Protein backbone atom coordinates (compact mmCIF):
# COMPACT_ATOMS: atom_id res chain seq x y z
CA UNK A 1 0.00 0.00 0.00
CA UNK A 2 3.03 2.27 0.18
CA UNK A 3 3.85 4.84 2.86
CA UNK A 4 1.17 6.37 5.04
CA UNK A 5 -0.07 9.75 3.83
CA UNK A 6 -0.54 12.38 6.53
CA UNK A 7 -1.57 15.99 6.04
CA UNK A 8 -1.21 18.71 8.63
CA UNK A 9 0.78 21.69 9.82
CA UNK A 10 3.55 22.32 12.37
CA UNK A 11 1.23 24.51 14.46
CA UNK A 12 -1.11 21.59 15.10
CA UNK A 13 -0.29 19.70 18.34
CA UNK A 14 -2.01 16.57 17.01
CA UNK A 15 -0.03 16.68 13.76
CA UNK A 16 3.17 16.84 15.77
CA UNK A 17 1.93 14.03 18.02
CA UNK A 18 1.32 11.68 15.09
CA UNK A 19 4.50 12.56 13.18
CA UNK A 20 6.53 11.74 16.30
CA UNK A 21 4.67 8.42 16.66
CA UNK A 22 5.41 7.52 13.04
CA UNK A 23 9.09 8.39 13.40
CA UNK A 24 9.44 6.40 16.62
CA UNK A 25 7.64 3.37 15.20
CA UNK A 26 9.68 3.44 11.97
CA UNK A 27 6.49 3.59 9.89
CA UNK A 28 7.11 4.94 6.37
CA UNK A 29 5.07 8.07 5.70
CA UNK A 30 4.75 11.11 3.47
CA UNK A 31 3.92 14.40 5.17
CA UNK A 32 1.72 16.61 3.02
CA UNK A 33 1.28 20.32 3.61
CA UNK A 34 -2.14 21.75 2.61
CA UNK A 35 -0.89 22.90 -0.84
CA UNK A 36 0.46 19.40 -1.51
CA UNK A 37 -2.86 17.87 -0.46
CA UNK A 38 -4.60 20.08 -3.04
CA UNK A 39 -2.00 19.25 -5.71
CA UNK A 40 -2.62 15.53 -5.22
CA UNK A 41 -6.39 16.01 -5.47
CA UNK A 42 -7.02 14.55 -2.02
CA UNK A 43 -10.15 15.45 -0.07
CA UNK A 44 -10.04 16.46 3.58
CA UNK A 45 -12.37 14.75 6.01
CA UNK A 46 -15.89 16.14 6.39
CA UNK A 47 -14.61 17.98 9.45
CA UNK A 48 -11.16 19.09 8.20
CA UNK A 49 -9.20 18.45 11.37
CA UNK A 50 -5.42 18.22 11.49
CA UNK A 51 -3.82 15.83 11.07
CA UNK A 52 -5.63 13.84 8.41
CA UNK A 53 -4.48 10.43 7.18
CA UNK A 54 -5.57 9.07 3.81
CA UNK A 55 -5.91 5.33 4.32
CA UNK A 56 -6.52 2.83 1.52
CA UNK A 57 -10.26 2.26 0.95
CA UNK A 58 -12.11 -0.79 -0.33
CA UNK A 59 -12.41 0.66 -3.85
CA UNK A 60 -8.72 1.40 -4.28
CA UNK A 61 -9.33 4.98 -3.21
CA UNK A 62 -7.92 6.97 -0.29
CA UNK A 63 -10.24 7.62 2.65
CA UNK A 64 -9.54 10.67 4.84
CA UNK A 65 -9.41 9.74 8.55
CA UNK A 66 -8.74 11.97 11.55
CA UNK A 67 -8.57 11.52 15.35
CA UNK A 68 -5.15 10.64 16.71
CA UNK A 69 -6.10 8.28 19.55
CA UNK A 70 -8.07 5.70 17.49
CA UNK A 71 -5.44 5.96 14.74
CA UNK A 72 -2.66 5.08 17.17
CA UNK A 73 -4.64 1.96 18.18
CA UNK A 74 -5.33 1.10 14.53
CA UNK A 75 -1.62 1.31 13.71
CA UNK A 76 -0.84 -0.87 16.74
CA UNK A 77 -3.04 -3.57 15.19
CA UNK A 78 -1.68 -3.19 11.67
CA UNK A 79 2.04 -2.75 12.30
CA UNK A 80 4.17 -4.89 14.58
CA UNK A 81 7.05 -3.74 16.72
CA UNK A 82 7.95 -0.62 18.71
CA UNK A 83 4.46 -0.42 20.25
CA UNK A 84 3.31 2.72 22.05
CA UNK A 85 0.47 1.00 23.96
CA UNK A 86 1.83 -0.86 27.00
CA UNK A 87 1.11 -4.63 27.07
CA UNK A 88 0.13 -4.53 30.77
CA UNK A 89 -3.60 -3.63 30.71
CA UNK A 90 -3.37 -1.62 33.94
CA UNK A 91 -0.39 0.39 32.71
CA UNK A 92 -2.16 0.84 29.37
CA UNK A 93 -5.16 2.35 31.16
CA UNK A 94 -2.97 4.89 32.94
CA UNK A 95 -1.32 5.66 29.60
CA UNK A 96 -4.74 6.21 27.98
CA UNK A 97 -5.87 8.45 30.83
CA UNK A 98 -2.77 10.65 30.59
CA UNK A 99 -3.08 10.73 26.80
CA UNK A 100 -6.66 11.95 27.06
CA UNK A 101 -5.65 14.61 29.60
CA UNK A 102 -3.11 15.96 27.13
CA UNK A 103 -5.50 15.82 24.19
CA UNK A 104 -8.51 17.29 26.00
CA UNK A 105 -7.15 19.52 28.81
CA UNK A 106 -3.68 20.64 27.79
CA UNK A 107 -5.18 21.66 24.46
CA UNK A 108 -7.41 24.10 26.38
CA UNK A 109 -4.29 25.50 28.01
CA UNK A 110 -2.56 25.79 24.63
CA UNK A 111 -5.53 27.46 22.96
CA UNK A 112 -5.95 29.87 25.88
CA UNK A 113 -2.37 31.13 25.88
CA UNK A 114 -2.21 31.37 22.09
CA UNK A 115 -5.29 33.55 21.74
CA UNK A 116 -5.53 35.42 25.05
CA UNK A 117 -2.26 37.41 25.02
CA UNK A 118 -1.21 40.04 22.47
CA UNK A 119 2.32 38.67 21.96
CA UNK A 120 1.01 35.16 21.41
CA UNK A 121 -1.80 36.32 19.11
CA UNK A 122 0.71 38.30 17.07
CA UNK A 123 3.14 35.40 16.67
CA UNK A 124 0.44 32.87 15.81
CA UNK A 125 -1.30 35.21 13.36
CA UNK A 126 2.01 36.04 11.65
CA UNK A 127 3.38 32.51 11.35
CA UNK A 128 0.55 29.95 11.22
CA UNK A 129 -1.05 31.11 7.93
CA UNK A 130 2.27 30.63 6.12
CA UNK A 131 2.07 26.91 6.80
CA UNK A 132 -1.03 26.74 4.60
CA UNK A 133 0.82 28.19 1.63
CA UNK A 134 4.35 29.48 2.13
CA UNK A 135 4.68 31.24 -1.24
CA UNK A 136 1.38 33.07 -1.24
CA UNK A 137 1.67 36.86 -1.77
CA UNK A 138 2.22 38.96 1.34
CA UNK A 139 -1.15 40.69 1.00
CA UNK A 140 -2.94 37.33 0.84
CA UNK A 141 -1.06 36.14 3.93
CA UNK A 142 -1.88 39.38 5.76
CA UNK A 143 -5.59 39.00 5.03
CA UNK A 144 -5.51 35.31 6.04
CA UNK A 145 -3.69 36.22 9.26
CA UNK A 146 -6.33 38.73 10.29
CA UNK A 147 -9.20 36.37 9.50
CA UNK A 148 -7.51 33.44 11.21
CA UNK A 149 -6.82 35.36 14.42
CA UNK A 150 -10.36 36.75 14.53
CA UNK A 151 -11.86 33.29 14.03
CA UNK A 152 -9.68 31.62 16.66
CA UNK A 153 -10.18 34.33 19.27
CA UNK A 154 -13.91 33.95 18.70
CA UNK A 155 -13.61 30.25 19.57
CA UNK A 156 -12.00 30.79 22.99
CA UNK A 157 -15.33 30.27 24.74
CA UNK A 158 -15.81 26.93 23.00
CA UNK A 159 -12.81 25.43 24.77
CA UNK A 160 -13.62 27.17 28.04
CA UNK A 161 -11.10 30.01 27.97
CA UNK A 162 -12.57 33.24 29.36
CA UNK A 163 -11.82 35.97 31.86
CA UNK A 164 -13.61 33.84 34.45
CA UNK A 165 -11.58 30.68 33.78
CA UNK A 166 -8.19 32.23 32.96
CA UNK A 167 -6.91 31.84 36.52
CA UNK A 168 -7.85 28.14 36.57
CA UNK A 169 -5.97 27.52 33.34
CA UNK A 170 -2.95 29.62 34.23
CA UNK A 171 -2.44 27.99 37.62
CA UNK A 172 -2.87 24.49 36.21
CA UNK A 173 -0.07 24.79 33.63
CA UNK A 174 2.76 25.55 36.12
CA UNK A 175 1.54 22.74 38.37
CA UNK A 176 1.60 20.34 35.45
CA UNK A 177 5.10 21.49 34.51
CA UNK A 178 6.28 20.87 38.08
CA UNK A 179 4.77 17.37 38.11
CA UNK A 180 6.21 16.45 34.71
CA UNK A 181 9.58 17.93 35.59
CA UNK A 182 9.73 15.86 38.79
CA UNK A 183 8.84 12.72 36.82
CA UNK A 184 11.50 13.37 34.18
CA UNK A 185 14.16 13.63 36.87
CA UNK A 186 13.70 9.89 37.42
CA UNK A 187 12.27 8.52 34.15
CA UNK A 188 12.91 9.54 30.52
CA UNK A 189 9.27 9.00 29.56
CA UNK A 190 5.87 8.95 31.25
CA UNK A 191 5.59 5.21 30.75
CA UNK A 192 9.09 4.36 31.91
CA UNK A 193 12.21 3.90 29.80
CA UNK A 194 10.21 3.85 26.57
CA UNK A 195 7.44 6.17 25.35
CA UNK A 196 3.74 5.41 25.40
CA UNK A 197 0.89 7.14 23.59
CA UNK A 198 0.65 9.58 26.51
CA UNK A 199 4.21 10.75 25.92
CA UNK A 200 3.41 11.68 22.35
CA UNK A 201 0.15 13.39 23.32
CA UNK A 202 1.87 15.52 25.97
CA UNK A 203 4.73 16.21 23.56
CA UNK A 204 2.29 17.38 20.88
CA UNK A 205 0.72 20.03 23.10
CA UNK A 206 4.12 21.10 24.46
CA UNK A 207 5.51 21.69 20.96
CA UNK A 208 3.27 24.74 21.10
CA UNK A 209 3.12 25.58 24.83
CA UNK A 210 6.81 25.09 25.56
CA UNK A 211 8.42 25.94 22.24
CA UNK A 212 6.24 28.24 20.13
CA UNK A 213 3.81 30.50 22.00
CA UNK A 214 5.80 33.24 23.83
CA UNK A 215 3.88 33.41 27.13
CA UNK A 216 3.82 29.69 28.08
CA UNK A 217 7.27 29.20 26.54
CA UNK A 218 8.71 31.78 28.97
CA UNK A 219 6.96 30.03 31.86
CA UNK A 220 8.38 26.68 30.73
CA UNK A 221 11.94 27.95 30.34
CA UNK A 222 11.89 29.62 33.73
CA UNK A 223 10.19 26.82 35.62
CA UNK A 224 11.18 23.60 33.85
CA UNK A 225 13.97 23.81 31.24
CA UNK A 226 14.18 20.01 31.50
CA UNK A 227 10.66 19.82 30.03
CA UNK A 228 11.67 22.14 27.19
CA UNK A 229 14.63 19.87 26.42
CA UNK A 230 12.43 16.75 26.62
CA UNK A 231 10.11 18.12 23.93
CA UNK A 232 13.05 18.52 21.55
CA UNK A 233 14.19 14.95 22.24
CA UNK A 234 10.75 13.35 21.77
CA UNK A 235 10.44 15.00 18.36
CA UNK A 236 12.49 12.19 16.82
CA UNK A 237 12.89 8.97 18.81
CA UNK A 238 13.70 6.85 15.77
CA UNK A 239 17.06 5.95 17.31
CA UNK A 240 15.60 4.61 20.58
CA UNK A 241 15.79 0.81 20.81
CA UNK A 242 13.03 -0.20 23.27
CA UNK A 243 12.72 -3.49 25.08
CA UNK A 244 9.76 -5.13 26.83
CA UNK A 245 11.34 -4.47 30.20
CA UNK A 246 11.33 -0.72 29.64
CA UNK A 247 7.67 -0.26 30.52
CA UNK A 248 6.83 0.77 34.08
CA UNK A 249 4.77 -2.08 35.63
CA UNK A 250 1.50 -0.88 37.16
CA UNK A 251 2.44 -2.69 40.38
CA UNK A 252 5.51 -0.43 40.61
CA UNK A 253 3.72 2.83 39.86
CA UNK A 254 6.10 5.67 40.80
CA UNK A 255 5.08 8.45 43.16
CA UNK A 256 5.50 10.84 40.24
CA UNK A 257 2.52 9.21 38.52
CA UNK A 258 0.44 10.06 41.58
CA UNK A 259 1.41 13.74 41.35
CA UNK A 260 0.48 13.85 37.67
CA UNK A 261 -2.81 12.02 38.21
CA UNK A 262 -3.66 14.32 41.13
CA UNK A 263 -3.36 17.25 38.73
CA UNK A 264 -5.79 15.46 36.40
CA UNK A 265 -8.18 15.06 39.30
CA UNK A 266 -8.10 18.81 40.04
CA UNK A 267 -8.90 20.09 36.56
CA UNK A 268 -9.54 17.63 33.74
CA UNK A 269 -11.78 15.23 35.68
CA UNK A 270 -14.40 17.70 36.99
CA UNK A 271 -14.65 19.43 33.61
CA UNK A 272 -14.93 16.17 31.65
CA UNK A 273 -17.60 14.85 34.03
CA UNK A 274 -19.58 18.09 33.95
CA UNK A 275 -19.44 18.05 30.16
CA UNK A 276 -20.66 14.43 30.06
CA UNK A 277 -23.54 15.29 32.40
CA UNK A 278 -24.52 18.32 30.34
CA UNK A 279 -24.61 16.18 27.20
CA UNK A 280 -26.67 13.50 28.96
CA UNK A 281 -29.17 16.15 30.10
CA UNK A 282 -29.30 17.85 26.70
CA UNK A 283 -27.83 21.10 28.03
CA UNK A 284 -25.67 23.37 25.89
CA UNK A 285 -23.74 24.90 28.78
CA UNK A 286 -21.25 23.09 30.99
CA UNK A 287 -20.81 24.33 34.55
CA UNK A 288 -18.19 22.78 36.81
CA UNK A 289 -16.31 23.61 39.98
CA UNK A 290 -12.54 23.48 39.55
CA UNK A 291 -10.31 24.29 42.51
CA UNK A 292 -13.22 26.06 44.18
CA UNK A 293 -13.84 28.29 41.15
CA UNK A 294 -16.59 28.24 38.52
CA UNK A 295 -15.79 26.79 35.10
CA UNK A 296 -18.11 27.27 32.14
CA UNK A 297 -17.90 26.24 28.52
CA UNK A 298 -20.11 25.01 25.73
CA UNK A 299 -20.96 21.31 25.79
CA UNK A 300 -18.48 19.40 23.64
CA UNK A 301 -19.80 16.08 22.24
CA UNK A 302 -16.35 14.68 21.42
CA UNK A 303 -15.21 14.97 25.03
CA UNK A 304 -18.33 13.06 26.03
CA UNK A 305 -17.10 10.24 23.77
CA UNK A 306 -13.71 10.36 25.48
CA UNK A 307 -15.28 9.72 28.87
CA UNK A 308 -17.31 6.86 27.43
CA UNK A 309 -14.23 5.29 25.80
CA UNK A 310 -12.26 5.45 29.05
CA UNK A 311 -15.13 3.88 30.97
CA UNK A 312 -15.45 1.15 28.35
CA UNK A 313 -11.70 0.47 28.56
CA UNK A 314 -11.94 0.22 32.34
CA UNK A 315 -14.94 -2.11 32.04
CA UNK A 316 -12.98 -4.45 29.76
CA UNK A 317 -10.27 -4.95 32.38
CA UNK A 318 -10.27 -8.12 34.43
CA UNK A 319 -11.28 -7.78 38.07
CA UNK A 320 -7.61 -8.11 39.07
CA UNK A 321 -6.52 -5.39 36.65
CA UNK A 322 -9.33 -3.08 37.76
CA UNK A 323 -8.07 -3.50 41.33
CA UNK A 324 -4.55 -2.56 40.20
CA UNK A 325 -5.88 0.54 38.42
CA UNK A 326 -8.00 1.46 41.44
CA UNK A 327 -4.91 1.28 43.64
CA UNK A 328 -3.05 3.69 41.35
CA UNK A 329 -5.98 6.14 41.10
CA UNK A 330 -6.94 6.02 44.78
CA UNK A 331 -6.90 9.49 46.32
CA UNK A 332 -5.94 11.30 43.10
CA UNK A 333 -9.41 12.61 42.31
CA UNK A 334 -9.49 10.59 39.08
CA UNK A 335 -11.81 7.91 40.47
CA UNK A 336 -15.08 9.77 39.65
CA UNK A 337 -14.21 9.72 35.96
CA UNK A 338 -14.82 5.97 35.89
CA UNK A 339 -17.21 5.30 38.79
CA UNK A 340 -19.55 8.28 39.28
CA UNK A 341 -23.03 8.23 37.82
CA UNK A 342 -23.35 10.56 34.82
CA UNK A 343 -27.04 10.34 33.93
CA UNK A 344 -29.42 11.26 36.71
Image (cartoon, rainbow, N blue to C red):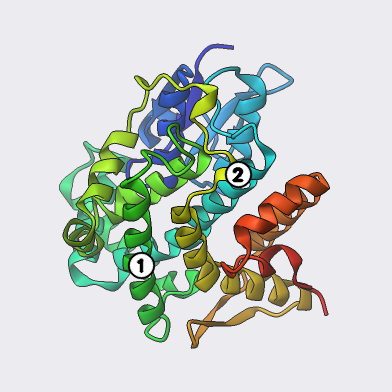
Measured as percent of width and height from the top left, residue 66 is found at 57, 41
Residue ID for mark 2: 250
Q: Residue furthest front?
A: 252
Measured as percent of width and height from the top left, residue 334 is found at 61, 65
Q: Along the polypeptide, which appears first: circle 2 or circle 1? A: 1
Classed neighbour count for the residue bearing mark 1: other residues with Cα under 10 Å, few (<14), some (14–19), many (≥20): some
Residue ID for mark 1: 175
Against 49, is 294 above or below? below
Against 79, is 150 above or below? below
Q: CA distance from mark 2 to mark 1?
A: 24 Å
- Which residue is painted at 36% across and 27% down in the image? 237
Mark in the foreground, 2 or 1: 2
User: For the residue labelled by badge 1, is the local secondary structure a helix, a strand or a loop?
Assistant: helix
Question: Residue 108, located in which quarter of the rendered image?
Answer: bottom left
Q: Residue furthest top?
A: 2
Question: Residue 164, located in which quarter of the rendered image?
Answer: bottom left
- Which residue is painted at 52% across and 59% down in the image? 104
Classed neighbour count for the residue bearing mark 2: other residues with Cα under 10 Å, few (<14), some (14–19), many (≥20): many
161 vs 310, nearest the viewer: 310
Q: Are marks 2 and 1 in contact (CB under 8 Å)?
A: no
Relative to residue 59, is residue 187 drawn left or right? left
Relative to residue 49, is residue 9 drawn left or right? left
Relative to residue 285, is residue 134 drawn left or right? left
User: For the residue labelled by badge 2, is the local secondary structure a helix, a strand or a loop?
Assistant: helix
Q: Residue 99 has which mark?
A: none
Measured as percent of width and height from the top left, residue 278 is found at 70, 77
Question: Residue 151, located in which quarter of the rendered image?
Answer: bottom left
Q: Is residue 1 visible?
A: yes
- Which residue is painted at 26% across and 53% down in the image? 210
Quadrant where the N terminus sits is top right
Relative to residue 12, is residue 248 drawn left or right? right
Amino acid sequence: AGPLLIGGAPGSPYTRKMLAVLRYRHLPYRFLTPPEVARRGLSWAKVPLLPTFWLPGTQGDRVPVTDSTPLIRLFEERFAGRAVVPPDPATAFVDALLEDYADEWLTKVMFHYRWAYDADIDRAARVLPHWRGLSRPDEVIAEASAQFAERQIGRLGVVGSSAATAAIIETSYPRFLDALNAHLREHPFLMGARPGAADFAVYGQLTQLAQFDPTPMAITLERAPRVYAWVSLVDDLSGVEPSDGDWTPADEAPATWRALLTELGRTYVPVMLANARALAAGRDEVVAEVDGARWTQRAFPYQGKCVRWLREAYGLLTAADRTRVDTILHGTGCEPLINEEIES
